[in-house]
């Protein structure tokens, strides 16, 4: 989301801690600087981030590119790869292959999808969404629970309307670059079935018209009974 960002979180945290020490009457000898802790050092406090599931949900709901990049680098580190674009690509591609995803033509240049070299198919996105709903993969459930709800939350909060027949029935992640618009997620049809879908459009000249068309396609899924 639009939250303020830090160019150097570690340094900012150190300076804030030094300021708090000063406010408490504890004098510090010098300004904070990077370095390794000496052997005699003791841990005085530990702070953990939100759970991985919550970070995935926030990244999807708010289309948070920074979190997406951090997540793909954590994936790389977990796989023993360097936390780089190349390492992240290798680690994520290998995991998708392990899950049996169709990777023909796919290329993951980054974690946010902002790189023009990124290539994924609608089939890959739809299959991944379906897998996230599989009872045998509860660890993937945040992929679904983090999706914006049509007319209610995140990047779909101002799309669809209160009178749209699909409001509340669609949960989907938006994708937007100049000339590229996409929508991938789930829809509940007239029979109460949960459907996975992915619509990708390139060469678009009007973002508003492209989004409206994608919304109409998703809405059609909620009306079908076949």
Image: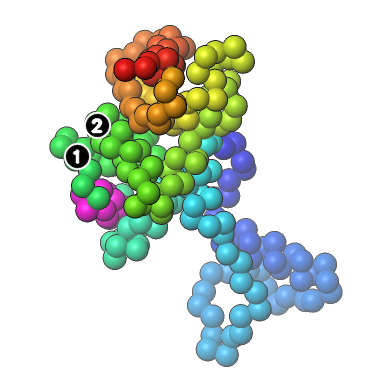
* Callout 1 secondary element: loop
Asked which quadrant contains residue 193, the reply is top left
- Residue under pointer 2: 123
Name the residue: 43% across, 47% down: 141
Q: Nearer the viewer, residue 69 or 53?
A: 53
- Residue under pointer 1: 102
- Residue 97 counted in the magenta span: yes
Q: Residues within 10 Å of mark 2 (few under 14, many from 20)?
A: some
Q: Locate the N terminus by quadrant.
A: top right
Magenta region: 87-98
Q: In the displayed image of the protein, which residue is found farthest to the bottom? A: 40
The Cα atoms of the two marked residues, 2 and 1, are separated by 7 Å
Which mark is on residue 129?
A: none
Name the residue: 52% across, 37% down: 61
Q: Nearer the viewer, residue 97 or 46?
A: 97
Q: Nearer the viewer, residue 97 or 38?
A: 97
């Amino acid at each position: 989301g639009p939250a303020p960002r830090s160019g150097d979180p570690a340094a900012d945290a150190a300076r804030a801690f030094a300021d708090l020490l000063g406010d408490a009457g504890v004098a510090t000898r010098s300004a904070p600087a990077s370095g390794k802790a000496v052997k005699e050092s003791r841990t005085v406090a530990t702070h953990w981030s939100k759970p991985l599931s919550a970070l995935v949900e926030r990244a999807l709901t708010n289309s948070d590119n920074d979190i997406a990049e951090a997540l793909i680098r954590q994936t790389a580190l977990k796989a023993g790869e360097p936390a780089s674009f190349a390492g992240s690509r290798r680690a994520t591609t290998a995991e998708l292959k392990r899950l049996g995803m169709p990777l023909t033509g796919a290329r993951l240049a980054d974690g946010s999808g902002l790189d023009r070299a990124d290539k994924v198919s609608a089939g890959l996105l739809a299959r991944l969404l379906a897998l996230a709903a599989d009872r045998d993969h509860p660890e993937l459930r945040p992929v679904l629970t983090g999706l914006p709800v049509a007319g209610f939350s995140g990047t779909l909060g101002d799309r669809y309307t209160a009178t749209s027949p699909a409001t509340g029935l669609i949960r989907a992640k938006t994708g937007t670059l100049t000339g590229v618009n996409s929508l991938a997620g789930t829809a509940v049809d007239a029979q109460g079935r949960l459907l996975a879908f992915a619509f990708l459009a390139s060469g678009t000249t009007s973002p508003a018209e492209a989004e409206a068309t994608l919304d109409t396609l998703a809405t059609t899924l909620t009306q079908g009974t076949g």
